[in-house]
Image (spheres, rainbow, N blue to C red):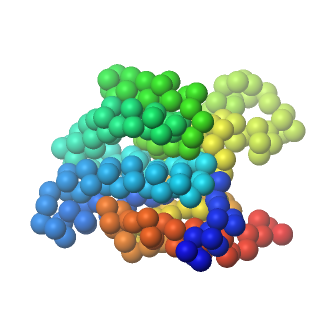
C-alpha cells in the first residue's frame, strides 16, 4: 500500500509502451507465435485498465511498426487481422469504460476494411472523457519525422520562414497529433532500445526496461514502475 501511495504523488500523464516478447512467450510454451500475439492483445486490454485506475490520462502502444512488414506474410496477415478483430471485439468495452481511441501512424498502407475499423473506433469514442489510448500502427519514428517535414513543405510550398518552424509548430504535424509527450516509456522482454518509437516525443521520457515478456506483464510490475518514476527527479535539461 505504501508503494501505491508513492506512485500517486507523481502519476505520469502519458505512458508509452513497446510491447515486446509475444513470439518468445509462445515459443517458451511450445505454441505458435500467433498465440503469443493473441495473448499480448489480452495484456494490452488489462494494462489500459491498470493505467486508468492509477490515474494515467494517455497511453500509447507500439502496436505495428514499419519494420513489421518484413516478417513472414502469414504473420503479417495474422497481426493485421488480429488488430482489426481486437478493435471490433473490444470497441464496446473501451467505449463503456470511457476510453478515447486514437490510431496513429501511416494508416494508408492498410486495406480499406481495416482502415474503416480504425476510423469507426476513433469516431465512436471521440466524445468520451476517460483515458486516451493510442495505437501506433505502421509507425516508425524516422518515417513520422519525414512525413511531418513533407507536410510542412507542402503547406508552405517550401517558402516557410525559419521563424515559423518552431518546435511547437513542427510537433503539430507529427502523426501523434495532440498527444502529450510520454513521461515514461516502458519496453518489455529485456531488449534495451527504443527501435524508432517516439524519437521526437520521447527525448525527455524516463526509460524503463523489463525482462518480463509482454503477455506476462502484470499490474504489480506496472505499479512498481510508476513507483520508481515517482522517485526520479526529472530535470528536463535544467
Q: In this view, does 172 lie to the left or right of 186?
A: right
User: Is residue 45 in view?
Assistant: yes
Q: Find residue 168 and report its image quarter.
A: top right
Residue at the left extreme, as displayed: 30
Residue at position x 39%, y 75% in the image: 211
Residue 68, x across and y down, in percent: 34, 49
Residue 1, x across and y down, in percent: 55, 74
Q: Is residue 164 left or right of residue 27?
A: right
Q: Find residue 43 and report its image quarter.
A: bottom left
Residue 132, x across and y down, in percent: 56, 42
111 or 152, nearer to the observer: 111
User: Is residue 146 in view?
Assistant: no
Position above or below: 225 against 88: below
Residue 188, x across and y down, in percent: 41, 66
Residue at position x 22%, y 42% in the image: 78
Residue at position x 37%, y 27% in the image: 117
Residue at the right extreme, as displayed: 163
Amino acid at each position: 500500500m505504501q508503494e501505491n501511495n508513492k506512485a500517486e504523488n507523481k502519476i505520469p500523464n502519458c505512458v508509452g509502451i513497446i510491447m515486446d516478447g509475444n513470439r518468445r512467450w509462445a515459443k517458451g510454451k511450445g505454441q505458435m507465435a500467433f498465440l503469443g500475439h493473441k495473448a499480448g492483445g489480452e495484456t494490452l486490454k488489462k494494462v489500459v485498465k491498470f493505467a486508468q485506475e492509477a490515474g494515467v490520462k494517455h497511453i500509447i502502444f507500439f502496436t505495428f511498426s514499419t519494420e513489421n512488414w518484413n516478417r513472414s506474410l502469414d504473420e503479417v496477415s495474422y497481426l493485421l487481422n488480429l488488430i482489426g478483430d481486437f478493435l471490433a471485439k473490444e470497441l464496446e468495452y473501451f467505449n463503456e469504460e470511457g476510453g478515447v481511441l486514437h490510431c496513429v501512424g501511416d494508416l494508408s498502407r492498410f486495406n480499406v476494411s481495416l482502415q474503416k475499423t480504425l476510423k469507426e473506433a476513433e469516431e465512436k469514442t471521440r466524445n468520451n472523457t476517460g483515458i486516451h489510448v493510442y495505437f501506433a500502427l505502421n509507425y516508425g519514428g524516422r518515417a513520422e519525422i519525414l512525413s511531418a517535414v513533407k507536410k510542412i513543405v507542402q503547406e508552405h510550398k517550401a517558402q516557410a520562414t525559419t521563424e515559423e518552424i518552431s518546435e511547437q509548430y513542427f510537433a503539430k504535424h507529427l502523426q501523434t497529433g495532440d498527444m502529450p509527450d510520454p513521461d515514461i516509456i516502458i519496453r518489455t522482454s529485456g531488449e534495451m532500445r527504443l527501435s524508432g518509437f517516439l524519437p521526437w516525443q520521447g527525448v525527455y521520457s524516463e526509460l524503463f526496461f523489463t525482462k518480463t515478456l509482454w503477455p506476462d506483464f502484470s499490474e504489480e510490475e506496472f505499479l512498481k514502475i510508476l513507483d520508481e518514476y515517482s522517485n526520479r527527479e526529472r530535470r528536463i535539461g535544467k
